[in-house]
Image (tube, helix red, strand yellow):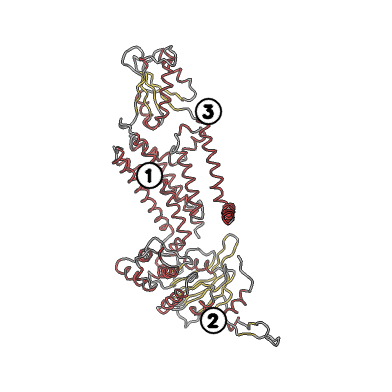
């Protein structure tokens, strides 16, 4: 009976803490609806068409029929380019693959179609391979199940290095998750300063408020950089990840780490207690990770969610780290995601600091 | 003798270390502090005595520069801008809660607060040692604060505000939840600090603490200072006679007034439930 009374007490307390109630009941429902929308879009094919490039070097009736067969598929958004442009677009993650139909295809032995794909989109590339094989078969007048030998497709990973190791692809996501953990932890530490009273003590010292907040931001940045560096060293030493340009990787890691400092500041004002900030912080970061492609491939998102994904710093963090590691971004290409990360970080920090100041005592 | 909310300076009195004139602060539509004026003299303690929610902590936060007053001025060491770092170094603030880093040692806490106040090198080490000695914590200097008893944490809480040798110390109910031994030690620390010339503002709702430690007492309620004076001055002016229960013959007797009667006469007998 005593256990029953204790349980009722806990439930009553939960019902009276509206913020906690939201994170216990409201947020899981919203998250379930979100996952449901993603899964339904994936199953019904109601996702954004995959951007694919056709490189027609053959210029024959057969190649035009192949193009026509592929263009008919509603899950593809087909465009045309030359081989160099197509390869570059896939490298920059603007297209997920290209299909190159070289001159002499179907007539000259040893000439094969080439499927160049983004190594980060391996799953979609398998789907595309099947689709292209069927298109080639239909265009040559065969049954889709029967693929003529001359229309065999060669697959090529478009990356700075041909190794295409799995951990190279996963490494940016791993770093993002490390920084997400840091952000959640430091957001709680910031609100702890308030609940323990140490923040008021610090404010009573001969220090401007900006110095106190700068101290918290600096500790958060150093922790972020330490986590990112440790994960990079582990990736290089134990998983064979190659860092071809340490300077670019350093820039991408620093931009991502700075962005998460700002996010930490913004998360710290989502609640008045450690529990509230921990719950709200993790929930927000999970949504960011999901929208940013850190949990499910972006190609599975319906169009309206894909638009929202541009707001997720996780997406830009992953792109910057991929660009600096295996996508071989140029300096100007790397500048775009890094600028977005710094912008998101700065805005988040300013908004968080403003709200923190308004609610500091 | 001062019974008015606004203290009057006489020419022979020493220059106040800290003075506030007509401070007001409201949160939303609620007036937390209204026209509070006070001054702190060297080597003297001013008690802010009031019931829960009277505005004592808000007044201290205004004096400490943590909150900005809506109206009024604060003069610290004759400077009109107490937000300046050089001026704020003259101030030490002891929060109501134990505001320490529990996973740092006592020495690490004191060193941190000393560094943040601009101390360094040998001077910092000396000041940390002095603060540890003040709190009688020298033998536990390198133990983590989370292993301390409540009384030890309270002593360190006070010591942390003295590490940079402030001229004025603001104490917000520093004895909440401590045992009689630690309380006696805290009193002795505060008396030592007074003797060294430090001016003290001591917020409390314990009458005996105000009587024992404070040279001047301001009775504060609903954000307003109702009266200011020494214990004897307040008792004379506001104590009256306290009626007791009827005696055997059915007559009433009255006992002598004390600070409690002053407090109840000024702030009323109704419960403060919020």
Quadrant assignment, res B267? bottom right
Q: Earlier in the sequence, mark 1 or mark 3?
A: 3
The location of residue B116, given as percent across then percent down, is: 37, 63
Q: Residue at x 44, y 72 (%)?
A: B169
Image quarter of the N terminus of chain B? bottom right
Q: Chain of mark 2?
A: B
Q: Residues within 10 Å of mark 1 (few under 14, many from 20)?
A: many
What is the number of the mark on residue B231?
Answer: 2
Can you see residue A1? yes
Q: Is residue B221 left or right of residue B158?
A: right
Are dots 1 and 2 on a single chain? Answer: no
Element on which disc 1 rests: helix
Can you see residue B127? no
The location of residue A304, given as percent across then percent down, is: 52, 34
Quadrant assignment, res A145? top left
Residue that extends furthest to the front in the rendered view of this protein: A1
Gap between marks 1 and 3 measured at Cα: 38 Å
Q: Chain of mark 1?
A: A
**Residue position for label 3:** A44
Gap between marks 1 and 2 measured at Cα: 62 Å
Are dots 1 and 3 on a single chain? Answer: yes
């Amino acid at each position: 009976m005593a256990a029953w009374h204790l349980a009722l007490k806990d439930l009553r307390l939960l019902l009276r803490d509206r913020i906690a109630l939201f994170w216990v009941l409201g947020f899981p429902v919203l998250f379930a609806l979100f996952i449901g929308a993603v899964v339904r879009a994936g199953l019904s094919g109601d996702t954004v068409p995959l951007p694919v490039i056709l490189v027609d070097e053959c210029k024959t009736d057969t190649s035009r029929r192949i193009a026509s067969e592929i263009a008919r598929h509603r899950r593809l958004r087909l465009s045309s380019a030359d081989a160099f442009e197509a390869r570059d677009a896939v490298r920059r993650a603007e297209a997920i693959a290209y299909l190159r139909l070289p001159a002499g295809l179907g007539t000259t032995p040893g000439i094969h179609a080439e499927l160049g794909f983004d190594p980060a989109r391996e799953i979609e590339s398998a789907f595309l391979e099947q689709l292209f094989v069927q298109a080639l078969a239909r265009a040559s007048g065969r049954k889709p199940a029967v693929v003529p030998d001359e229309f065999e497709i060669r697959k090529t990973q478009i990356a700075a290095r041909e190794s295409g190791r799995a951990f190279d692809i996963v490494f940016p996501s791993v770093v993002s998750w490390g920084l997400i953990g840091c952000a959640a932890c430091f957001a709680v530490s910031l609100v702890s300063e308030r609940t323990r009273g140490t923040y008021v003590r610090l404010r009573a010292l001969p220090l401007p408020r900006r110095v106190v907040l700068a101290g918290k931001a600096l500790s958060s940045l150093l922790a972020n950089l330490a986590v990112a560096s440790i994960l990079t060293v582990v990736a290089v030493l134990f998983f064979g990840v190659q860092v071809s340009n340490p300077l670019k990787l350093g820039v991408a890691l620093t931009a991502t780490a700075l962005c998460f400092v700002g996010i930490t500041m913004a998360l710290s004002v989502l609640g008045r207690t450690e529990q509230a900030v921990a719950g709200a912080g993790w929930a927000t970061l999970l949504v960011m990770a999901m929208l940013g492609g850190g949990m499910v491939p972006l190609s599975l998102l319906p169009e309206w969610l894909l638009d929202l994904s541009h707001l997720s710093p996780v997406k830009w963090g992953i792109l910057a780290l991929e660009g600096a590691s295996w996508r071989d971004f140029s300096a100007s290409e790397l500048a775009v995601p890094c600028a977005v990360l710094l912008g998101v970080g700065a805005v988040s920090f300013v908004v968080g600091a403003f709200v923190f100041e308004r609610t500091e005592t | 003798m001062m019974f008015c909310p606004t203290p009057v300076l006489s020419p022979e009195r020493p220059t106040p270390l800290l003075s506030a004139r007509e401070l007001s602060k409201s949160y939303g539509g609620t007036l937390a502090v209204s026209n509070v004026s006070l001054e702190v003299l060297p080597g003297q303690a001013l008690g802010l005595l009031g019931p829960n929610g009277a505005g004592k902590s808000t007044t201290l936060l205004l004096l400490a520069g943590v909150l900005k007053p809506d109206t009024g001025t604060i003069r610290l060491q004759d400077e009109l801008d107490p937000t300046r770092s050089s001026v704020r170094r003259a101030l030490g603030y002891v929060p109501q809660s134990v505001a320490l880093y529990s996973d740092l040692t006592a020495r690490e806490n004191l060193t941190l607060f000393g560094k943040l106040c601009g101390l360094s090198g040998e001077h910092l080490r000396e000041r940390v040692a002095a603060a540890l000695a003040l709190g009688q914590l020298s033998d536990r200097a390198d133990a983590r604060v989370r292993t301390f008893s409540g009384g030890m944490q309270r002593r360190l809480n006070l010591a942390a505000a003295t590490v940079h040798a402030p001229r004025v110390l603001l104490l917000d109910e520093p004895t909440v939840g401590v045992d009689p031994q630690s309380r006696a030690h805290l009193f002795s620390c505060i008396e030592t600090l007074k003797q060294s010339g430090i001016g003290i503002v001591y917020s409390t709702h314990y009458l005996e603490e105000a009587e024992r430690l404070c040279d001047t007492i301001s009775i504060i309620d609903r954000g307003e200072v109702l009266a200011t004076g020494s214990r004897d001055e307040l008792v004379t002016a506001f104590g009256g006679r306290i009626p007791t229960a009827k005696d055997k013959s059915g007559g009433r007797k009255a006992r002598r007034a004390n600070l409690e009667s002053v407090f109840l006469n000024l702030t009323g007998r109704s419960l403060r439930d919020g």
